[in-house]
Image: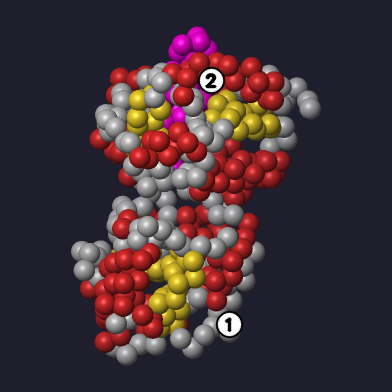
Amino acid sequence: MGSNLKRILVFTGWYPSVENATQYTFVRQQVAMMNKYLPLTTNEKWKFVVWNKPAPTDIFNHLMRRPAKVSVWKDEEISIFTHQSVLLSHRLPMDQSFIHLRDMYTQFPSVLNELGGTPDLVWCVTLTSASLWNRFMEKNKLNIPFILQEHSVPLTMHLRHRWNLNEARRMLKRNSGVVVVAERQFAEFSKLDKSIKPHLIWNAVTEEFLSGTSKNKNLSNTFVFLFVGRLSDQKGLWRLIDATQKLVGNKLNFVIKLIGAGPDELRLRNYIKKKGTSDYFEWLGPKPSEEISREMDKAHAFVLPSFYENCPVALLEAQVMGLPCVCTINGASEKVLLPGNGIAVQDEGNGIALGNALAKMIKGYSHYDRAAIRKRSIAEFSPDVFVKKMYGVFVDAMR
């Protein structure tokens, strides 16, 4: 490799081996995108090494059984995020801690050996990993540029859980760039430092969704709404079930297909039975991206009734597949729903407004051009767009 090689250390901190598998998948996908599309952006050579090691299952289970008061980043403690955005912490003996500063010091030479030298930039993929990396640099008197990308847990979650604000401010002043995936995060970061000007870069969709046809042909006579996501309270499926009453009352021919799994599946099934609308729902279970893209290709529209989102990846994927979408206004979904791509509705939680929007989608479906939806969505959410934007952040950070 030539002298113009850029070495990038992707620091994840650490993830539980099960609960954050989805989040770690995003990291691997983003690195794969960088490796594939960077040669189209620059003649420089880049090398990425991800510093990650799954947490031992026995420690993870111990934490889940005995959550305790949070005190973040003390050497003798572990703090973890589940993908439900719940911060758990429990004091463990020093010899049981999975990763703390001394672990990092021990592992760092191996990381440098894998990189082939000192990193030109450290890419921290969460606030938590950036905080830990900053402490590691302070303690070892290192001065390596790093950027912070936060794509999951909102800053307000950290603040509620008594994140060390002085340390956070030091970290934010030292970092060389902040990348966020939701507009609300601009305001959140200003609470810590008004001088921070984050880069808004949406997550990119993966190749499976770029290869779809999204031609409005061979669709079922029954109008198919598709939902993709975790079956949990956050996703607002209770009000989606209530919203179907509007469609049933108007004698509309529809079905809602649900892709995903989660802790509320049994309760949701029972609620649907109670409402007498079981015939209008199909449970497809969790599916890999390839199968999700095929289901999107067969659906008429996508629905996302969430109470909270940061960057709803499934909504990006649906638009790239050419699906008109119905989503609820929650501070994020309506921001990534591009103009002309569907309906964003303010629902108070009872499903009435959502039901009206679903009925409007069915009745006005012929006005949507799936090819046009797909074209403008690819222009915003494709991997090459993501890579070009991240490349700009990298270059600025290394100056």
Q: Secondary structure at mark 1?
A: loop
Q: Position of residue 84 (x, y in %)?
A: 37, 47
Q: Which residue position holds label 2?
A: 104
Q: Are marks 1 and 2 in contact (CB under 8 Å)?
A: no
Report the residue at 50% width, 75% height from top.
Answer: 299
Q: Position of residue 254 (x, y in %)?
A: 40, 83
Q: Is 251 a magenta residue?
A: no
The quadrant of the image that shows the C terminus is: top right
Q: Position of residue 161 (x, y in %)?
A: 27, 33
Report the residue at 69% width, 32% height from top.
Answer: 46
Image-quadrant location for residue 337: bottom left
Q: Is residue 242 above or below residue 335?
A: below
Q: Which residue position holds label 1?
A: 217
Image-quadrant location for residue 87: top left
Q: Is residue 205 visible?
A: yes
Position of 201 with respect to 288 (left or right) is left
**Residue kind at label 2, given as amino acid type:** Met
Q: Is residue 101 above or below residue 81?
A: above
Give how far apart the Cα atoms at labels 1 and 2 are. Answer: 55 Å
Report the residue at 46% width, 62% height from top.
Answer: 260
Chain part drawn in magenta: 127-151
| Residue closer to the observer: 117 or 379 | 117
Report the residue at 53% width, 20% height from top.
Answer: 104
